[in-house]
Amino acid sequence: MHAEYHSLNKDFPEKQAQLLKLSQENPAFARKADDYEALNQRICSLQEGASDAAALESLMQERLALKDDIARDLKRASGSCCGGCCG
């Protein structure tokens, strides 16, 4: 199976400066970003080898949820709505 690496810089190319700034200034955000990158590495490793499809799907869902959480943090940091109020 082809393994595609989903780095945060690739997923949010227009937010690279903001990603760096938040990672440097906010330890909780930096931890999320590190967790996201580590999860990507695990997923790529599983995709490259013979793996359990259910485990891979679970990790991919976890990555998606973390990406959504990071996207909300980026929105909030830019002064936009956090996405939770529907406004």
Image: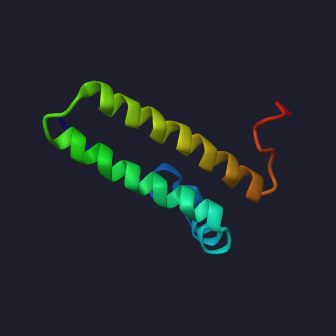
Quarter that holds the N terminus: top left
Q: Position of residue 87 (x, y in %)?
A: 86, 34
Which residue is outermost to the left?
50
Q: Is residue 80 above or below residue 25?
A: above
Residue 28 found in image quarter: bottom right
Q: Position of residue 68 (x, y in %)?
A: 59, 41
Q: Residue at left 57%, top 70%?
A: 20
On the picture, is 20 further left or further right than 39?
A: right
Q: Residue at left 40%, top 35%?
A: 60
On the picture, is 38 further left or further right than 20?
A: left
On the picture, is 18 further left or further right than 6?
A: right
Q: How many marks?
A: 0
Q: Position of residue 47 (x, y in %)?
A: 22, 39
Front position in the image: 52 or 14 = 52
Q: Is residue 2 above or below residue 41?
A: above
Q: Position of residue 82 (x, y in %)?
A: 77, 44
